[in-house]
Amino acid sequence: MSEITQDMSPAVTFGLLAAWALHDAEEVAFGPRWIREHLPELRERFSGAPERLWTALEGVDQREFTVAVGAVAVIVAAASARGHRTGGRSAFFQGAVDGFGLHGLVHLAQAVAVRGYTPGSVTSPLIVIPYAVWARGRLRRAGRLRPTDARGVVSGLAVAGAATALSHFVARRLVKR
């Protein structure tokens, strides 16, 4: 028997994938080049950061970054589809919405930390955060929003960070220089 619930707009569930695609288009277009151009100044400004961070950033090229984004696309598409099949009730879908919105706040914090543009900082306040707030509101009005607490926020950020790390690990293996 199908789990499809017709009373939740696909704009809510598949909106996650659409918002993510628009946001990550900005990251693909500007990410690796921005990193290359700003790495010396970032190293100087944040000299206390671990060397392995700088080594990892130095190693990111356009192909690897694009493949990593593709790997995350699979995760986001799966979350969107699960959200659609469950009428938005899925914990996986709601966690992805929360993680996506929180990751938009991280992009804004990065822009503040460097006192300027960082890849993702344009679409975060225009697409990422508004989508997450809107989707949560729609889920809340439909009586489907799971409660979020501090543990949920930490969990959402951890899942977003883990998905990013995993995607780059997979991409590095696939692209092998």
Image (tube, helix red, strand yellow):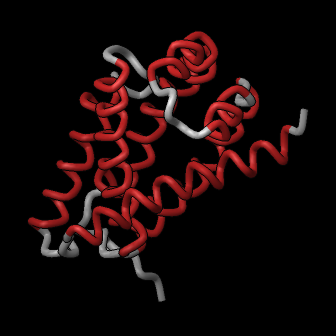
Occupied quadrant, residue 172:
top right
Q: Which residue is drawn at 44% across and 31% down?
A: 22
Residue 168 shows in this picture: yes
> In this rendering, would 25 be left or right of 176?
left
Please determine whether, in this image, residue 80 is positioned above or below residue 92: above
Total number of numbered discs in the rendering = 0
Q: Position of residue 56 (x, y in %)?
A: 69, 36
Question: In the rendered view, would you say 5 is above or below 131?
Answer: below
The foreground one among 58 and 166 is: 58
**Dividing the picture into quarters, in which one does residue 140 lie?**
bottom left
Given residues 173 and 25, the one toward you in this image is 173
User: Splitting the image into 4 quarters, where does residue 125 fall?
Assistant: top left
Depth check, front residue: 153 or 174: 153
Taking the spot 70% from the left edge, 30% from the top edge, the residue there is: 60
Residue 91 or 141: which is nearer the viewer?
91
Q: In the figure, 15 relative to 140: above or below?
A: above
In-image side of 13 versus 167 (left or right): left
Q: Residue 143: percent from the left, percent from the top?
A: 13, 75
Q: Which residue is drawn at 26% across and 49% down?
A: 132
Q: Where is residue 1 in the image (x, y as percent from the top left)?
A: 48, 89
